[in-house]
């Protein structure tokens, strides 16, 4: 939206702050590729046919997410039963840990 303001010479000019009122354009970085191959932006809803590089990035992202999910499932299955034992051992260690000798400064300042 531009406004015309008359200046001292009688000519009109555009508002210098006009460009700051508009919302920034979406970079379409956060997108999802559907099974047909169309990419859809998660912020603005724009759709397009992705390039080979975008398809490769999406495939790598999905592979990394699947690996992380597999690791979390493995960790929960194999280490989950150790959690109660681990908490009890840590609590016992905190209660009964050997006290470290504290350094005593016996120097008299005068």
Image (cartoon, rainbow, N blue to C red):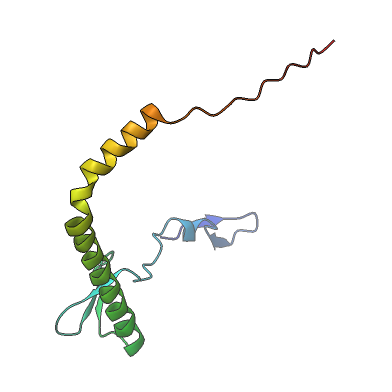
Q: In this picture, is 7 found above or below 65?
A: above
The x and y percentages for residue 9 are: 65, 58
Q: Quadrant of residue 83?
A: top left
Residue drawn at x 48%, y 61% is 19
Residue drawn at x 32%, y 32% is 92
Q: How many marks?
A: 0
The x and y percentages for residue 90 are: 33, 37
In this rendered view, identify the residue nearer to me: 70 or 84.
Answer: 84
In this rendered view, identify the residue nearer to me: 8 or 45.
Answer: 45
Q: In this picture, is 3 found above or below 83?
A: below
Q: Residue furthest bottom?
A: 52
In this rendered view, identify the residue nearer to me: 109 or 34.
Answer: 109
Q: Quadrant of residue 46?
A: bottom left
Relative to 54, 110 lies left or right = right
In this rendered view, identify the residue nearer to me: 78 or 73.
Answer: 78
Q: Quadrant of the C terminus?
A: top right
The x and y percentages for residue 101 are: 58, 26
Residue drawn at x 54%, y 29% is 100
Residue drawn at x 25%, y 65% is 71
Relative to 99, 53 lies left or right = left
Q: In this picture, is 5 found above or below 110?
A: below
Q: Quadrant of residue 49?
A: bottom left
The x and y percentages for residue 57 are: 34, 79
Relative to 78, 95 lies left or right = right
Q: Quadrant of the N terminus?
A: bottom left
């Amino acid at each position: 939206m531009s406004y015309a303001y008359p200046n001292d010479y009688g000519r009109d000019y555009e508002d210098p702050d006009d460009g700051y009122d508009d919302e920034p354009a979406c970079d379409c970085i956060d997108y999802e590729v559907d099974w047909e191959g169309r990419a859809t932006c998660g912020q603005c809803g724009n759709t397009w046919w992705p390039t080979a590089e975008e398809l490769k990035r999406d495939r790598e992202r999905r592979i990394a997410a699947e690996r992380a999910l597999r690791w979390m499932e493995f960790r929960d299955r194999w280490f989950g039963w150790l959690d109660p034992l681990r908490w009890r051992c840590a609590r016992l260690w905190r209660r009964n840990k050997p006290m470290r000798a504290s350094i005593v400064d016996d120097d008299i300042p005068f």
